[in-house]
Image (cartoon, rainbow, N blue to C red):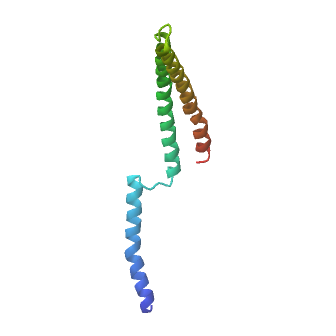
Amino acid sequence: MNGRTTKTAIIMTAVMPVAMSLTATALAAGNLSFTGNTVFSQFSTLISDAQRMIIGVSTPAAGIGVGVGALMKKFAGMSGAEAQQKMTMGNKIITSSIVGWAAINGLTLILSTVRNYL
């Protein structure tokens, strides 16, 4: 064996056990997995969890908004500029609540489409 081949053999003999032990440690710790648990599947799980939480909060929030708007309209009074202003504000609150709820629940379609490509 010449000098270059000997150096290569020594380096490979020193490097290979270290690389193998690091790989085994990473596999044992769960940081590196070859079983399909990739960053994309973790991202897909994150999207699903976020979607479930957002939709779980959006419906009660929209219900509260519609209720507040309805109460505002109910107790606006009979006539006058202030009553008209409260009626208009109540209508805006109801409309905004319904549009916001529809937009958030429409986000489900977008997230499910994106999740199919991950």
Give left or right: position of 37 versus 28: right
In x, y percent, where is residue 79?
Answer: 50, 9
Give the vertical position of 25 relative to 118 (above or below): below
Give the vertical position of 36 relative to 81 (above or below): below
Tell which of 37 and 86 is nearer to you: 86
Which residue extends farthest front? 81
Give the vertical position of 4 relative to 81 (above or below): below
Tell which of 1 and 76 is nearer to you: 76
Give the vertical position of 113 relative to 40 (above or below): above
For the point 58% across and 29% down, which residue is it?
102
Which residue extends farthest top? 78
For the point 56% across and 31% down, which residue is it?
105
In x, y percent, where is residue 106?
Answer: 59, 33
In x, y percent, where is residue 113?
Answer: 62, 41
For the point 50% across and 13% down, which residue is it?
73
For the point 39% across and 81% down, which residue is it?
10
Tell which of 83 and 47 is nearer to you: 83
Whether residue 38 appears in this view of the structure is no
> How many numbered discs, if any?
0
Give left or right: position of 117 versus 29: right
In x, y percent, where is residue 68?
Answer: 46, 18
Whether residue 73 appears in this view of the structure is yes
Instruction: Indicate the quadrant containing the N terminus: top left, top right, bottom left or bottom right.
Output: bottom left
